[in-house]
Image: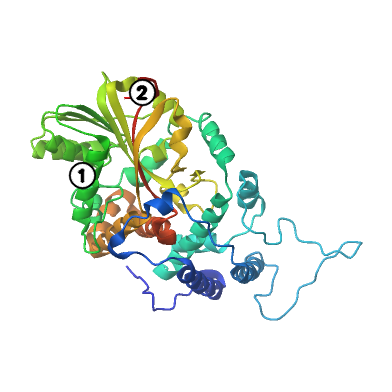
Amino acid sequence: MYSMSMGERGEAPDGMSGVIRYESLLAARTMAQRQPKKSAGCADSVESFRNPKPKPRFDKDVFCKTSAIRRLRSDFLHGDGSRGTGRHRAVARGPDGVRLHPAGRQRPNLPVASSASRTRHDQGSGRMSVVSAIIGTAERVPLPDVVIRAAIQRLCSRTATRISALGADDEAAFAGRMMLRPIAEDVDAANAGHDEAPASFIAQALGPNRKYSSCFYTTDATTLREAEEEALRQTVAHAGLADGQTILELGCGWGSLSLWTARQFPHAKVTAVSNSQGQRAYVEEQARLRGLLNLRVVTADMNVFAPEGQFDRIVSVEMFEHVMNWRKLMTRLRSWLAPEGRLFMHIVTHRSGSHLFDRANREDWIAQHVFTGGLMASHHLVRQFDDIFTVEKEWCWSGTHYQRTANDWLANFDAHRDAIEASLRNVHGDETALWMRRWRWFFLATSGLFGYAGGTEWGVSHYRMKAADEGVS
């Protein structure tokens, strides 16, 4: 399959190449100027994630340059400009001599945080931005990684700027709106995307434990296998898992934690829940091959799932991102816990503000193809539900751990490209080339999101919680 190296010149269709190349270089230069240097050994930025320093002021010069590019590009895309050839188009003016802007065209404004403003931007302007132009192009033809990374960096920057203006009232309002939704949304769409990826593909792309979530890197030389195992060890310790317990894992994925736990604690009884038939079949087969008789796997939709009995521990690793109504699910979880039981959550979070992955937003490629029906919680969102569960202890992982995880996945993807393409062809047929590009987009987007600002903007949060009515221990 043809691919372009970073040093090659890639011509984008529809005459967009000059605009895309210029803005990619501008975004890359801005990223290099703004991002802090990473500390040796990939040390966690826990304090900066919990208590972030004031963000730098908006760069007016960069904004003016990108705004000019945006206006030029929009003129070209909508056929009302001259492609920058020096010719001038007629300017319409009203009776008072004031210049009239075409319908749907607005002067560029600074990014704002309110949902109303975001809705106007996403739906009212009707204009194609650089990000959506690059995304649309990348869906059709390969683009160099430098262009894709620049688009991701731009999208992260805009999102971070918008979230920075949110306050405590916005967080409470976000939690209130969650109550109006079902527990899980777009379940079928999510399965059609990544949850139902073939096991042969997962075997090539992920690490040996098939951990489809953030790993933890202790040194610069840590391998993916070592990072998987360290993340699993920390998860077991933070959740307080022990032999002899009854353990329920919600959203078990490809079984990395459930298989690890069942092996480590042979007298524990582990129930793993997934909404994917393919994942269930894989985990059951692995349990059989390893002689793990204490692991049971269930396929269920979380909207209707109701287990039998109660559990000493309920654990969830990167599942609550797909839960839209935390209050409703947490209320159920509390009734599933045995006395003195604990709930453990591993979720990806933003340091200060919660936001949705908006499928209606043409620029939110992850929401459309990967994270359908999902949300990004803030590190503090869980405390909006302290009448159900109270946080007993919490931990933060720097986003650089997920950045390195995604980079290792991408390296595996590129190293086993032929085998992966054959696996995906069995599922996607004529759309295999498209899904090969989409998977690369996913790995690049994950790396770019969590690596943004040195891993201090988005990261991973761990919480061990007890029922609010349990009292002080």
Q: In this view, does 428 lie to the left or right of 236?
A: right
Picture coordinates of residue 374, whole percent (x, y)? 44, 41
In the image, residue 7 sits, relative to residue 241, either above or below, namely below
Q: Is mark 1 on a helix, strand or loop?
A: helix
Q: Nearer the viewer, residue 346 or 209?
A: 346
The outermost residue toward the front is 473
If the image is split into quadrants, where does the N terminus sit? Answer: bottom left
Q: Quadrant of residue 406?
A: bottom left
Residue at the disc numbered 1: 233
Picture coordinates of residue 49, whole percent (x, y)? 42, 51
In the image, residue 296 sits, relative to residue 156, either above or below, namely above
Q: What residue type is labelled 2?
A: Arg
If the image is split into quadrants, where does the C terminus sit? Answer: top left
Residue at the disc numbered 2: 334
Q: What element carries label 2?
A: helix
Picture coordinates of residue 315, whole percent (x, y)? 29, 34
**Residue at the (56%, 40%) spot, across then down:** 168
**Residue at the (18%, 51%) spot, across then down:** 208
Q: Which of 258 and 86 is in front in this view?
A: 258
